[in-house]
Image (cartoon, rainbow, N blue to C red):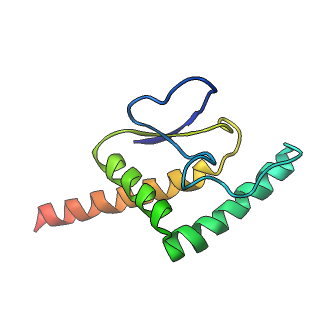
């Protein structure tokens, strides 16, 4: 299961928690300045496009390897994506959505293979 958690200053991540903030290869490159909900929507929407175009489309080595590692972990256990934004709208929702979709597709492939 993939979920999103709130990263907190001074508290180290525990087993199953993975940073997706700007310190990680999957961090949102679009900064917020006003912290308004409109701006949050704007940078999260921009990240959706960035994720599709840059990470999935171009597969930069560090980001792609990190994303694949998260997928491997999600296929075998729980993953908590940690960012400072949660529970507000966060770019981690984009990452979670992709991971959930990939896990679902893999489960479907496993079921089809088991039925053959």
Tell me how many marks there are.
Answer: 0
The spot of residue 44 in percent (x, y) is 71, 55
Give left or right: position of 81 versus 23. left
Q: Residue at the spot x=59%, y=46% of the render?
A: 23
The front one of 3 and 20 is 20
The quadrant of the picture occupied by the N terminus is top left
The spot of residue 67 in percent (x, y) is 44, 57
Q: Name the outermost residue toward the top.
A: 10
Looking at the image, residue 29 lies above or below residue 37: below
The spot of residue 72 in percent (x, y) is 32, 53
The spot of residue 40 in percent (x, y) is 78, 49
Q: Name the outermost residue toward the left.
A: 116
Residue 7, picture quadrant: top right
Give left or right: position of 107 versus 70. left
Looking at the image, residue 20 lies above or below residue 56: above
Q: Residue at the spot x=10%, y=68% of the render?
A: 116
Give left or right: position of 36 versus 106. right
Looking at the image, residue 102 lies above or below residue 38: below
């Amino acid at each position: 299961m993939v979920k999103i958690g709130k990263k907190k200053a001074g508290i180290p991540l525990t087993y199953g928690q993975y940073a997706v903030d700007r310190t990680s290869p999957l961090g949102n490159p679009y900064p917020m300045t006003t912290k308004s909900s409109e701006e949050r929507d704007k940078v999260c929407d921009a990240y959706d496009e960035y994720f599709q175009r840059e990470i999935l489309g171009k597969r930069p080595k560090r980001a792609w390897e990190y994303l694949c590692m998260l997928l491997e972990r999600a296929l075998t256990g729980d993953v908590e994506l940690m960012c400072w934004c949660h529970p507000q709208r966060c770019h981690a929702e984009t990452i979670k959505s992709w991971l959930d979709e990939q896990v679902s597709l893999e489960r479907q492939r496993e079921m089809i293979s088991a039925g053959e």
